[in-house]
Amino acid sequence: MKNRRFGSIRENGFLYVFEHFFSAYRGFFFAVCGILLVAVPYMDLNRATLRLVTMIALYSMLGMGLNVLVGYTGQVSLGHAGFYGIGAYACALLQVRLGLSFWPSLALAGVFTALVGLLLGLPTLRLSGTYLSIVTLGFCEVVQMVLKQWESVTFGNYGVRNIPKPELFGYTFNLQNGGFYQIILALAVLTAVGCLAVKNSKTGRAFLAIKNDELAATMMGIRTSRYKILAFVISAFITGIAGGFYSVINNGYIEPTNFVFNISVLIISVVIVGGLGTIRGMVFGAALLLLFPEVFRGLNEWRFVIYGVLLVLMMQFRPQGALGWQSTLPFKLSRRTKRELEARGLSPSRLNEGKGA
Amino acid sequence: MGFLNVENITMQFGGLRAVDNVSFHVDQGEIVSLIGPNGAGKTTVFNMLTGVYRITGGTMEFLGVKLEGKMPQDIVKLGIARTFQNLRLFSKMRVIENVLVGMHVNTRYSFFGGLFRSAGFRREESRKAVRAVEILKSIGLLKHLNSYAESLPYGEQRKVEIARAMATDAKLLLLDEPAAGMNPAETEELLRFIRQLRDEGYTILLIEHDMNVVMNISDRIYVLDHGRLIADGLPEEIANNRDVVDAYLGGERKKHAED
């Protein structure tokens, strides 16, 4: 049997075979997944299931948002429930207090949360690791306090009521008609595409370089402070949009306790269990963690014990997350690049051959 | 206007003077070595040149531009790139990605250009990828293009560091013990490659321990000991210099008895 190695990559490994098989037929796989995802509202699901699927999509998006921060630049935030809450309240209050419709409110909620992300990003530049986590945890509590105490704006503990349902050209989106699901599916797909685009640009590579070795990144001319703040801003923007969406799917009602610290923990669990730095991991993590309490409902309080044990085992045996493997596929070169390499006699098809090994 | 002129630079860490009044210069197209026993302050000089440390005295000029007080990122942009004594690769990234990160300063598109895949983005990324492949080919890493940096043997990782420094479009490469951890054959190949770099127009300032390497490759040599410059000159002059031999082998060390 052949057991060639392309550098670090074993050609006969399970992952290699799996990834290359998937890659060869990826058009087909994406089409099937796409059709399945779009078809969900027409599958005659009951309300609870539809809501669960909607929440999984929502948490996938929240995971992607936090992933920009934790997975790409390696900054751990325990304060994302804060951003989530700010996005939700911004979107809800713009509609209820100023009478804006849903779509501009959603966009503004994202922008406003991104600004808050910028402000939080500034003082955290000098912090990393545990200290950064503590500051972001504090941020989460501050947001909680503001939402509860600033009654003249946020309605305090009463929460925001009568948030209208989103409409577009006379069509009202709600849970039963699958409208909520369609909105969050579109948002999550857009987020995923955006995250991948950023990851495969100089911005994403700068993020990853900072995570790998900040001093070396500086020595490559990367303005690390700027990029660390940018990661906060992008992350906050995505989380704010997700929050804005959440504000309308909750029977027109949100309150401060929807955005407590536990939510931060859930979001970061999605990222870590799923697989840091990947999009597939976010979807998987969200599905796993939201299905878990449903499947193990019979265990009552014991399910938290199992949940805890799972997390510990995960940390011990698979710290990169369930789907957090390093790709064995070759580095993706654009068609244009391949053409230009060909013209220079550096044919990409021959790049992998172990010449002079 | 000189290429790199360093005058009387001093680095004081509290009570310790790691580099004391050191002056040297490097001309375009030279291979200059900085040698000295452990703790002589060689790497500190690199850290001063690249803006990691804020120097406490003296002046440094590169192509007529003052370096002191500049951010490391601006110094890279001026054309000085370095490697590290203890490898500092982006170890979870691929070899080609490491090189692409090196090109960060010369990438001309914005964040939104990358997000929306603008024409400028596609042109730049393609140009960079081709250049990265060329660099990797010249240094003999083509077969590792797709590998993750952490999976490479030590000697190959050193080469990735050099490739990454070249990618910044630097005119001056600061190589901190590039031959460390290499076997004699690899070292020989590295020497050939460094000469080739010089022929391609790079100027090289080298820190090295291996005397064989230093004597073989350097146009000129500076010797540091205890933060002070104790000798400079051609390789053969250095090899016969009494102070240098003392510094390396012990000797009477009268000079430091007074300290």
Image (cartoon, coloured by chain):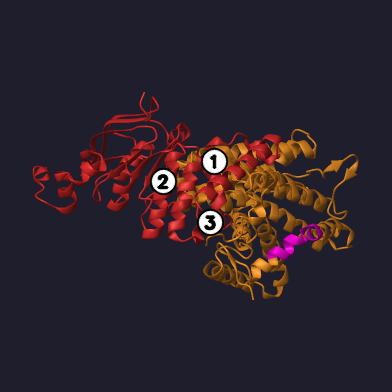
Classify B177 as above or below A12.
Answer: above
Q: Residues within 10 Å of mark 1 (few under 14, many from 20)?
A: many
Say which element carries label 3. loop
Give the labeled residue for mark 3: B92
Q: Residues within 10 Å of mark 2 (few under 14, many from 20)?
A: many
Say which element carries label 2. helix
Question: According to the colouring, which chain is orange?
Answer: A
Whole-number angstrom distance, CA of label 1 to CA of label 3:
18 Å
Residue placed most toward the observer, A337 or B201: B201
Query: What residue do we see at 46% from left, 42% from top?
Result: A218
Query: What residue do we see at 11% from left, 47% from top?
Result: B253
Q: Which residues are magenta?
A: A19-30
User: Can residue A345 be seen at all in this image of the molecule?
Assistant: yes
Which amino acid lies under the numbered mark 3 shown in the image of this protein?
Lys
- What is the chain identity of the residue bearing mark 3? B
Residue A220 image point, x, y percent: 48, 41
